[in-house]
Image: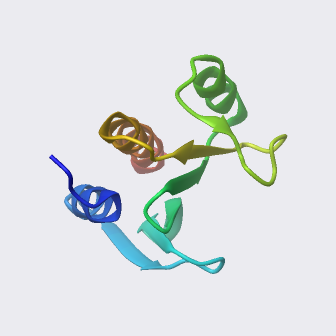
Amino acid sequence: MNTNRKETLTAELLSWPGVTVQPHRFGGIEFNYEGKEIGHLHGDHLVDMLLPKSIRDEMISAGRAQPHHIYPESGWVSIYLKSETDTSEAIELLRLKYELMKNK
């Protein structure tokens, strides 16, 4: 299945209650829940999201995300979408962030 990664991510996230999409201030699109950012997508190849530091460290150690491409020491992570597996992984981590936000 060779679907556009941007379309796949957008369709999935917009199927979650309360999620909206808007242009991101640094380009690409931003996914929000109740006005707060879940994460954003640059083009159709790079997802960035802010995670609590302990979860961020765990995801990087497990190889599920990489340190942010510009701010590697921050709580932000980057996920490069090179395959459908990467896209699925990004959706799982965005869902984790969404659930954290919902349960706050």
Residue at the extreme top of the image, as rendered: 62
Q: Quadrant of residue 86?
A: top left
The percent coordinates of residue 81 (x first, y second) are 45, 47
Q: How is the image coloured?
A: rainbow
Direction from residue 37 to residue 57 in the image, left or right: right
- Residue 89 against residue 9 in the figure, above or below: above
Residue 88 position, x and y percent, is 32, 38
Which residue appears at 81% of the width and 51% of the height?
A: 71
Q: Which of the 4 image quadrants contains residue 11? A: bottom left
The percent coordinates of residue 57 (x first, y second) are 69, 25
Q: Is residue 80 placed above or below 25 in the rendered structure?
A: above
What residue lies at 62% left-to-right and 42% top-to-bottom? 51
- In the picture, measured across the screen, residue 9 lies left or right of residue 53, that is left
Residue 97 position, x and y percent, is 47, 44
Asked whether, in this view, residue 101 is left or right of residue 2, the answer is right
Which sits in the foreground, 64 or 2?
Answer: 2
**Which residue shows up at 71% across the image and 46% down it?**
68
Is 38 drawn above or below residue 68 in the view shown? below
> What residue do we see at 58% from left, 53% from top?
48
Q: Nearer the viewer, residue 28 or 16?
A: 28
Total numbered labels placed on residues in the image: 0
Q: Quadrant of residue 79?
A: top right
| Residue 104 or residue 29, whichever sits in front | 29
